[in-house]
Image: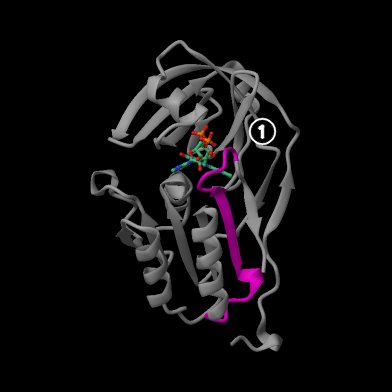
Amino acid sequence: MSDPETLPVRRIQRIRHELQRRDLEVARVEQLSPNFVAVTLRGESLSSFRSDSFDDHVKLFFGEDFKRDYTPRSFDVVGQELTIEFALHGSGPASDWARQAAVGQHLLAAGPRGSMVIPPDYDWHLLIGDASALPAIHRRLEELQPAASVVALIQVSEEVDRRSLPTQAQVQWVATHEALQAAVAAWTPPKGEGFAWAAGEASAMAAVRRLLVAKGLPKEALRVSAYWKAGAAAFHEALEA
Ligand SMILES: Cc1cc2nc3c(=O)[nH]c(=O)nc-3n(C[C@H](O)[C@H](O)[C@H](O)COP(=O)(O)OP(=O)(O)OC[C@H]3O[C@@H](n4cnc5c(N)ncnc54)[C@H](O)[C@@H]3O)c2cc1C
């Protein structure tokens, strides 16, 4: 367990952004793999778009009644483009929309409202997630220095959805929640100050968090979020002790 004298200080920086709602047009649709679709949105209002952290989210509006959170996977304020990667699943307004997305359609996007910036200079990084978190993990890997020490434990149910990721990461792909938990249980915290980030299904993430806490990781070095919950629509929660 960690010695309280040497506990890392909380170094996450919170940044607030003015909330803006943007009417965007689909500029490109790319099927990345059978269960992932990248949709690039374009609009002049994106010239003021800001996203300082890989785990930021925008709210996307699917008609009047449905809004869902998605990661700004990449953006270009000069080119006024924002790309979102949708993990396709059984059915839901967001996933259904992504399946039929076509150039010229419009989508409303709000935010990000703020960013929680996790510094890149930790001695090591652990990234854990399922398909819903893969866009955020991929962005983080692109943003970290090539020399960063990173382990990524990623769950996608079908092997065809595995992808090549920036090479600094030691990546382990798994297919089930149970295998993800086994991979987390088998992971040993390296020496030095590190940060563990995890996101995915609510109960799976609660189990992941318990495993990380049991390894002695202090809560200052942890950020675990539920990006969705089996059987519930539009669920988002930060998991605390
Ligand atoms: C901060 C944040 C960032 C996110 N970033 C992304 C992202 O970049 N890409 C991405 O694909 N998702 C992302 N998600 C997850 C996404 O918001 C949810 O999966 C959302 O519920 C999908 O909406 P829906 O309308 O398709 O389904 P909903 O109407 O919300 O749910 C319908 C049913 O589908 C189930 N379901 C929902 N999501 C999934 C899933 N991923 N896999 C299997 N079953 C599911 C629900 O349990 C429910 O039974 C993010 C979530 C958060 C909180």
From this view, report whether residue 239 is shown above or below residue 18: below
Residue drawn at point x = 76 percent, y = 33 percent: 18
227 inside magenta stretch: yes
**Residue type of the residue flagged with mark 1:** Gly
- At horizontal 48% and vertical 36% (from top left) the residue drawn is 74
Check disc 1 and report its element: helix, strand or loop: loop
Provide the residue span drawn in magenta.
Answer: 215-234
Left or right: residue 14 versus residue 168 is right
Residue 15 at what x, y percent from top left?
Answer: 72, 47
Q: Residue furthest left?
A: 160
Q: Does residue 80 sit above or below 38 in this rendering? A: above
Q: Disc 1 designates what residue?
A: 111
**Label 1 crowding class (10 Å Cα cut-off): few <14, some 14-19, many 20+?**
many
Q: Which residue is located at x 27 percent, y 47 percent? A: 158
| Scheme by which the image is coloured | one colour
Quadrant of the frame with the C terminus: bottom right
In the image, taking residue 170 as reference, residue 106 lies left or right, namely right
Does residue 188 lie above or below 76 as drawn? below
Q: Residue at x 47, y 56 (%)?
A: 144
238 falls in the magenta region: no
Compared with residue 161, is residue 86 higher up or lower down, i.e. above or below? Answer: above
Nearer-the-camera pick, 148 or 17: 17
Spot occupied by residue 231 in the image (x, y as percentages of width and height): 52, 44
Res. 129 image quadrant = bottom left
Question: 16 or 104: which is nearer to us?
Answer: 104
- Residue 90 percent location from the top left of the image: 40, 35
Residue 14 lies left or right of residue 47; in this view the side is right
Query: Outermost residue toward the front?
Result: 231
